[in-house]
Image (cartoon, rainbow, N blue to C red):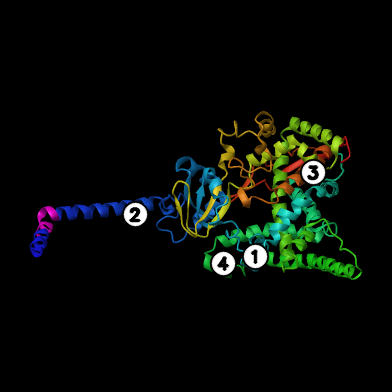
Amino acid sequence: MMEDALLAGLQRFLSPEGLGVIIALSLSAIVGRLAVLSRNRSNDISKLPLVNGKKPWQWTAREQREKFCLHAKEIIDDALANVGDKFLLQTENGVELLLSADYANQIKDDEALDFGKHDMHSYLDGFAPFRQGQSPDRIFHDAIKINLTQDIAKLNLPLSEEASHALQKHWTDNTEWHEIPLKLLAFKIVSQLSSRVFLGEELCRNDDWLQVTVDYTRDSMQAAQDLRLWPRFLRVFAYWYLPRCRAIRDELKTSRTIVEPVLEKRRLQIQERKKQGLDPIRHLDAMQWMEDSSNGRPYDPSAAQIMMAIAANFSGSDSLSTLMIFLCQEPQLVEDMRKEIISVMTESKWNKSTLYKLRLMDSVLKESQRMKPAAVAVMRRLALKDTKLHDGTKIPRGTKLMVSTARSWDPEKYPNPERFDGYRFLRMREEQGLETAQFVSTTPDALGFGMGKHACPGRFFASNELKIALSHIILKYDFKLAPGAPTKPEFQALFWSANDNARIVIRRRKEEIQL
């Protein structure tokens, strides 16, 4: 009986109707699987358009990389307008994923996305300073984020003293109108102020140190750019022959001959005082903070100092130059800022709350950064493992990505975004109570300092340094644009800097109060 039942079942199974059911079920499974695969592929970034890829007949993307270095903003703006909120770009550093600011909150602290490993060639000795923020020992990071922040209020008076000295040296006390190269002297002034904080009184006016920081900042950026135009597997060889790469190796050697003897002298003094039963002398500078943060662990003090100089001098001098170009065209704004400085400084001098009270100046700083951020894309990351965006887009391990700063010019966020309005963020704070309108605040609408745990840790110091320098400039000088001098910013790939050839005309004025 069982055999008959099995035979009957088998006959039904093999009947045309039964085979039809099998085929239908099989096709359904296949179609379902294809749909899943298609859906997965559609969410993969490989399906996103590469907006400036190489042509089919081209062996390499060198032409596209070089074009990107010259026209990055135009390429990105066009793609954001016509492609969408995410796409692939052939950058100077290879193919990268560009995201709109809508994704900034999501990726800012994603543990799968690494901030430090984005390619600055730090595996090569000449680029050793760029390893500083990547080390798991966090010596450099803690020295800036913890020690500098704790001592920041104590630095106001030393910075003010250095600003006075630097301006007298580079802008002079000449009361007649005279022309100066803006960017070069801004770099020298910021470099001297930063060196007072990083290296202390012993070295902050050392001409050899100031020169090597200028040279290494310039040459390292260009050397990195030169190397990116080479295929990755050839860079380690090109590094030994490219002129800028040779230059940065020599500059690092020079920096060691300046920094290490001073540090060694301090260490010997500590030992001597311990023998005498005395507490060590504490210095108010980053050389001391690095020693505290290291707690006896080995680190590279010269590379750390160079990295601090790059971070402060490169961005600080560019910010100051950009500000001066805007202010030269806004005489009423300058007069209002001057009145604010006099009012605040008459009341409180350089105490902890002084710089916070310069609210108009803070607004001017933020508006200048909005108009011209340091880069047209920030928050550059490398995916250490597969991850996913909130819209389901899959980011495979090894993907390089970044976030556009284009929202800075969004008319829905900022009315008349093409117009410099130094009062813009002051109004936002007064009318809307938006404390996020402060210069140091980070939001998707204002990504000048990045965002999240990797946001610029030195932005509070940078803000204070700029406010102190500006206070001295506005009280002590009249200034205007030099006739015919260029003012348009310059591009180098993603980076947007004040015009190197900008010139202004200045004269010393009698300040209303002593700073």
**Residue under the point 73% across and 40% down:** 324
What kind of residue is marked 1? Answer: Cys
Disc 2 element? helix
Span of residues in magenta: 11-18
Q: Position of residue 398 (x, y in %)?
A: 50, 60
Residue closest to the eye, 311 or 34 = 34
Q: In this view, does 12 lie to the left or right of 444?
A: left
Q: In this view, does 162 lie above or below 116?
A: above
Mark earlier in primary sequence (3, 2): 2
Mark earlier in primary sequence (1, 3): 1
Q: Is residue 216 visible?
A: no
Question: According to the image, label 2 marks what residue?
Answer: 37
Dot 4: within a 10 Å radius of its alpha carbon, few (fewer than 14), some, or many (20 or more) residues? some
Is disc 1 in contact with disc 2, using a CB cutoff of under 8 Å?
Answer: no
Is disc 3 in contact with disc 4, using a CB cutoff of under 8 Å?
Answer: no
In the picture, the disc for residue 486 is none
Is disc 4 in contact with disc 1, using a CB cutoff of under 8 Å?
Answer: no
Q: Distance between the residues labelled 1 and 3?
A: 35 Å
Dot 2: within a 10 Å radius of its alpha carbon, few (fewer than 14), some, or many (20 or more) residues? few
Question: According to the image, label 4 marks what residue?
Answer: 235
Question: According to the image, label 1 marks what residue?
Answer: 245
Q: Is residue 274 above or below residue 343?
A: below
In the picture, the disc for residue 468 is 3
Q: Is residue 314 above or below residue 297?
A: above
The quarter of the rendered structure image containing the N terminus is: bottom left
Q: Distance between the residues labelled 2 and 4?
A: 38 Å
Q: Position of residue 435 (x, y in %)?
A: 67, 37
Q: Nearer the viewer, mark 3 or mark 2?
A: 2
Dot 1: within a 10 Å radius of its alpha carbon, few (fewer than 14), some, or many (20 or more) residues? many
What kind of residue is marked 2? Answer: Leu
